[in-house]
Image: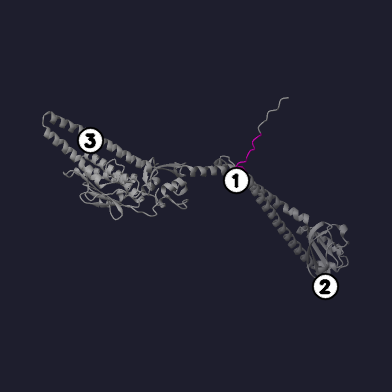
Amino acid sequence: MSERPHLPLPRRRVRSLAGQLFVVQVVIVAAVVAGGAVLAYLFTAGRAEDAARSQVTAVARSVADSPSVLAAATGPDPSAVLQPYAEQVRVHTGVSFVTVMDIRGVRWTHPTPEQIGKPFLGHIERALAGETLSETYTGTLGPSVRVVTPVLDGDRRVVALVSVGRTVRSISEQLRGPLTALAGVALAALVVGGLGTYLANARLRRHTHGMGAAELSHLYEYHQATLHSVREGLVLLDRQHRVVLCNDAARELLGLEGELEGRPIAGLGLPQSLVAAVLTPEPARDELHLTAERVVVLNTSAIGTGLGSVLTLRDHTELQALSGELDSVRGFTDALGAQAHEAANRLHAVVSLIELGRHHEAVEFATAELALAQQLTDRVVAAVAEPVLAALLLGKAAQAAERGVELTLTEDSRIDDGVLPPDLSARDLVTLLGNLVDNAVDAAIEGAAEHPDQPEVTVTARVEDDRLLLRVADTGPGIDPDAVDDAFRRGWSTKSGGRGLGLALVAQTARRNGGTVEVGRERGAVLTVRLPLRRAGVARR
């Protein structure tokens, strides 16, 4: 006998959040409407009973105060006189009964003639004492709201009693119209409330994509875990440019701490260029910006139609440093190629002098070129024991010479081996001195167009008062004093088409290492970087 295949169990359908809220809201609306209807009914019924009690009291007192009633009560046949009068009053006033009785409670009048002469059903003790009694009592016509009041003669003696009442049934029939209207209003309120709830929940269902509360909760947890686990910085802003979300990577890249949600982006202490790029309506695409310690790549994009914007940030610090080193290596390569070309030309000249038999001139020519090239090398190697700085200076000197700029090292320059602290990385030294020299060479070439003298760049590197001093001077046009603050911001440059990033990187690197950058002027611009050799409590990243 073959086994029956196992059918998969049907998946339990989870009601969406909008559906759950719809059910809850309908129940709440129905309960509120029903409660309101009950309270309105009780209030209306109470008011109707009070109105009936006031009505029968007024009618009873009017009948008891009537002289004809007093006269008939003391006459020979009270029923013959009072029965037509009582029925006339009952019909005209709309009450259920008007009963006149003697002081023993025997009826003289009644809407049902068969009840005349029979005892009154109710309490008459207080009425016999001269008071007006109001009560709800079940008599021959059923439950009724009634009043019993005395008929007094001229001596204020009780000679008869008058009872006027309305049955509870007649009061209920009077309430039928208002209760029908009340039920209609309640039903209309329930329909309108249900329709409004349905429309609101239909919109909620569209926005939640029909997902349930558990699904939305899981989606939120996944969303939060994803945003805070990605290595790229992510910042969400609302339409007023207030922070909605800032993940951990963005906090680290921008150096932000504390509560950020709800704060405007302009009030977070970020660089002005970055804030301006964020506030600009046009989206940013791979823009480089400098924070206090990092180089970040910024991209911005709008969210929906005016809902806000999203910022993505990538750390470009290491890549920027590597790019600078690569540019230096490429420059060294170009300089070496140019030197090889010059060396080949000089070698041809030496060979030609030898072939001409002018050996003495050939030796002088060769040794003079060697002495000129060796002089700078010996000067740099003797003064700067730090190999990275020495290699950088020699490479930059070759590059400058290729461009027609003379780079010299001052006589007071000296950095002994082991002086620089281990936490001052070689990459930071390359960033500092390399960018200073590159900017100085460009400025010197620019200044040569106005002055006939050979463009020069002078470099000073020494230890002074437990600080590393790097000073680069050029013979260019200098930096306008009004533009000193802008010179270290991203995008500032005196060169057409320049990115304006070199001096900004210098300022950032100096600040990260606890140092300072100063701008002065001699023949041209003089930029001085001072870095402390011993730093306590300076956090490095």
Relative horizontal placement of residue 99, taking residue 352 as reference (left or right): right
| 12 in the magenta segment | yes
Question: Which residue is denoted by mark 2 in the rendering?
Answer: 157
Q: Which residues are magenta?
A: 9-21
Name which residue type carries label 1.
Answer: Gly
Say if 489 sits above or below 143 in the image: above
Residue, x 25% and y 34% (percent of image)? Answer: 337
* Mark sitting on residue 196: 1
Q: Secondary structure at mark 3?
A: helix
Find the residue positioned furthest to the bottom: 155
Q: Residue at x 24, y 43 (%)?
A: 441
Q: Nearer the viewer, residue 99 or 355?
A: 355
Mark 1 to mark 2 CA distance (whole Å): 68 Å
Q: Is residue 85 left or right of residue 265?
A: right
Q: Closer to the camera: disc 3 or disc 1? A: 3
The reply to whether discs 1 and 2 touch (Cβ–Cβ < 8 Å) is no
Picture layout, residue 311 above or below residue 537: above
Earlier-in-chain disc, 1 versus 2: 2
Instruction: Provide the secondary structure element on which disc 2 rests.
Output: loop
Near-viewer residue (125 or 266): 266
In this orientation, does residue 518 appear? yes
| Rendered image: mark on residue 439 | none
| Category of crowding for the residue at label 1, using alpha-carbon neighbours closer than 10 angstroms: few (below 14), some (14–19), many (at least 20) | few
**Residue that mark 3 sits on:** 339
Q: Percent from the top left, x then y, of residue 373? A: 20, 40
Total tally of numbered discs in the picture: 3
Of callouts 2 and 3, the N-terminal one? 2
Q: Nearer the viewer, residue 424 or 57?
A: 424
